Image: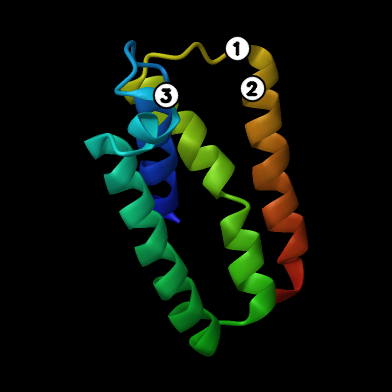
């Protein structure tokens, strides 16, 4: 979950930077973008391994928290504004995860 948030934040940061590096292909071979995609590969492998050990219900509830992590990282590292609408959305996601897993608590 944390790695997904890191890679998505890197992609947002790299997309917001000025300058093109040689057209369509050049935009995708920038170091930050390649690192973010490398992290996505690690996330995919760890997802397969996690699904072997974890209940599917718990796993997908936790993946919903990726949105919360991205909002937090974007606010801290990218200095994006977090307004009341974003805070309300994050609280709804957290509430949904809690309600979804009530029988596990």
Place of residue 64 in the rendered image (x, y in percent of width and height, measured from the top left):
63, 52
Residue 52 seen from this side: yes
Distance CA(mark 2)–CA(mark 1): 5 Å
The numbered disc on residue 30 is: none
Name the one closer to the observer, 50 or 91.
Answer: 50
Residues at circles 2 and 1 in contact by the CB criterion of under 8 Å = yes
Q: Residues within 10 Å of mark 2 (few under 14, many from 20)?
A: few
> Which tag, 2 or 3, sits closer to the chain's start?
3
Residue 105 seen from this side: no
- From the image, tell me which residue sits under label 2: 86
Question: Which quadrant of the structure image shows residue 21?
Answer: top left
Distance CA(mark 2)–CA(mark 3): 21 Å
Q: Where, quadrant-wise, is the C terminus in this rendering? A: bottom right
Q: Secondary structure at mark 1?
A: loop
Q: In percent of the image, x 34 and y 10: which residue is there?
A: 18
Place of residue 38 in the rendered image (x, y in percent of width and height, measured from the top left):
32, 55
**Is label 1 or label 3 in front?**
3
Q: Secondary structure at mark 2?
A: helix
**Is label 2 or label 3 in front?**
3
The numbered disc on residue 83 is: 1
> Which tag, 1 or 3, sits closer to the chain's start?
3
Q: Where, quadrant-wise, is the N terminus in this rendering? A: bottom left
- From the image, tell me which residue sits under label 3: 15
The answer to whether 92 is drawn above or below residue 22 in the figure is: below
Q: Residue furthest left?
A: 31
Q: Residues within 10 Å of mark 3 (few under 14, many from 20)?
A: some
In the image, 89: left or right of 21?
Answer: right
């Amino acid at each position: 979950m944390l790695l997904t948030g890191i890679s998505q934040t890197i992609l947002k940061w790299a997309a917001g930077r000025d300058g093109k590096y040689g057209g369509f292909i050049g935009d995708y071979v920038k170091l930050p973008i390649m690192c973010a995609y490398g992290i996505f590969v690690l996330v995919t492998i760890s997802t397969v391994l996690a699904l072997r050990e974890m209940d599917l219900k718990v796993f997908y509830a936790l993946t919903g928290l990726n949105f919360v992590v991205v909002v937090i990282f974007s606010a801290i590292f990218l200095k994006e504004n977090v307004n009341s609408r974003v805070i309300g959305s994050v609280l709804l996601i957290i509430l949904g995860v809690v309600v979804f897993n009530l029988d596990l608590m």
